[in-house]
Image: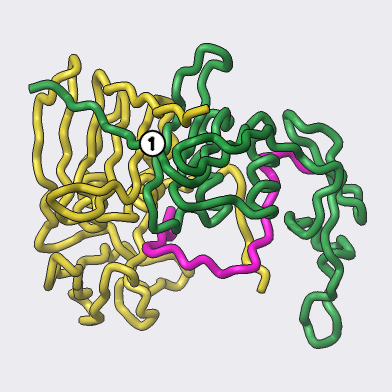
Chain colours: A yellow, B green
Amino acid sequence: MSEENLKIERIHKGTVIDHIDAGYALTILSLTGLDESPDLMTIGVNVLSKKHGKKDIIKIEGVFLNEIQMQKVSILSPNATISLIDNDDVIEKKKVSIPKVIEKLIVCVNKTCISNSENISGRKEPIDTEFLVLEEKPLKIQCVYCDRIYNLEEITFISKEKIEKRVKQRIQL
Amino acid sequence: MSEENLKIERIHKGTVIDHIDAGYALTILSLTGLDESPDLMTIGVNVLSKKHGKKDIIKIEGVFLNEIQMQKVSILSPNATISLIDNDDVIEKKKVSIPKVIEKLIVCVNKTCISNSENISGRKEPIDTEFLVLEEKPLKIQCVYCDRIYNLEEITFISKEKIEKRVKQRIQL
C-alpha cells in the first residue's frame, strides 16, 4: 500500500507567498491572522529548494494581503516573494520590502520607554511606536524613542484585533 | 504565466494525519509542538473532500506521534486518521480514539476546583486533572472534581514544556 501523493490544487484566485524563511510559514499565518481563512490553504514547511536550501511556501485561495500583513511578512521573511493569482494566472509578483521605519506595528517592551507611558486614567497615551531598521537580515531594529535594539526573535507585534484562538494552552512547569 | 503547482513530495518515513476537522490543522500543529519540526511538513487546510466536505491534512517527515500528541489530536479532531509511513509505504493506519477519561492533559479553569488548590508555599498540589468524556463530537467533557462542563472551544491544554514562540503578539485594543 503506497502512500498517496497529497494532491495540491492550484489556486485560482488568491496569493502565493514563496521563499519564506524555513520554519516561518506557521508564524506568518498566525501573526497575520491568515490562519483563520475559511478557504483552501496549502502550506509547505522546510521544503528543499535548489536555490535557497530549505524554505517555506504558503498558497491561500481567495485572499489578498493588506498593507499590514505585507509588512509583517517582510519583517518575518525579508526574502519572501508575493504572487497575486487571478484566473489561474500570476498577475503580479513582487519581493516584499521591509520599510526603513516600522510604525505602529511592534511593541517596545522597555517599560520606561515613552511609547509605554500611561496617563492618569491608566490608558495608553497615543504615542505610536516607531523603529528604525538597522539591518534587514538578520533583522535588527531600534526604538526611536529609547534606542533599545531588538532582533527578530525578540519582537512582539501589536495586534488591534483580539484573535481568540479556538483552543488554548497553558504552561504548567 | 501560469501559476505553478506546488509539488508536494511524498513523505518517506513519518506520519500522515488525515480527516482532520476543517480549520484545525494549524491548532493541532501548535498544541502538539509538531510545528517546531525541522523536517519537511506539508499541510492542507480546508481541502475539499468528496466524502466529508472540507477537511485538513498534515504530512510530517521523520516524526511519529507520542501518546500525548495522539490524545490531543483525538480531542481536536475525533474523526482523524493517523498513518505511519516507512519506506514510502503505509505500515499502519488507524483512527484516533478519544479516551473515556482524559487525565493530566487539560486545565480546569474553575478557580475553586480542587485541581487548582495551592498549598502554603503557593505551589500546585499534585492533583492531576481528570475529565469524563460525555460526548465525543461535538466534544463535551466534565471535570470529575467540580463537575464543570466544557466544550471544545473552552478547553485549555496543559503544557509541560515552555514552548517559546519565535515572535510574539500582544493585543492592544
In this picture, is B111 found above or below A29?
below
Chain letter for the residue marked with disc 1 in the picture: B
B76 vs B22: above or below: below
Q: Secondary structure at mark 1?
A: loop
Side (left or right) of B16 relative to A87? right
Total label count? Answer: 1
Q: Is residue A143 visible?
A: yes
Q: Quadrant of the C terminus of chain A?
A: bottom right
Residue A23: image x %, image y %? 34, 55
Say left or right for A173 vs B47. Answer: right
A11, B64: nearer the viewer? B64
Which of the 4 image quadrants contains residue A146?
A: bottom left
Q: Residues within 10 Å of mark 1 (few under 14, many from 20)?
A: some
**Residue B97, picture quadrant:** top right
B62 is within the stretch colored magenta: no
Disc 1 residue type (three-letter): Arg
Q: Which residue: 56% across, 69% down?
A: B162
Q: Is residue B156 above or below residue B79?
A: below
> Which residue is under mark 1?
B10
**Residue at 38% across, 36% down:** B10
Q: Which residues are magenta?
A: B150-173
**Residue at x 74% of width, y 29% of height:** B137
Q: Position of residue B81 (x, y in %)?
A: 62, 33
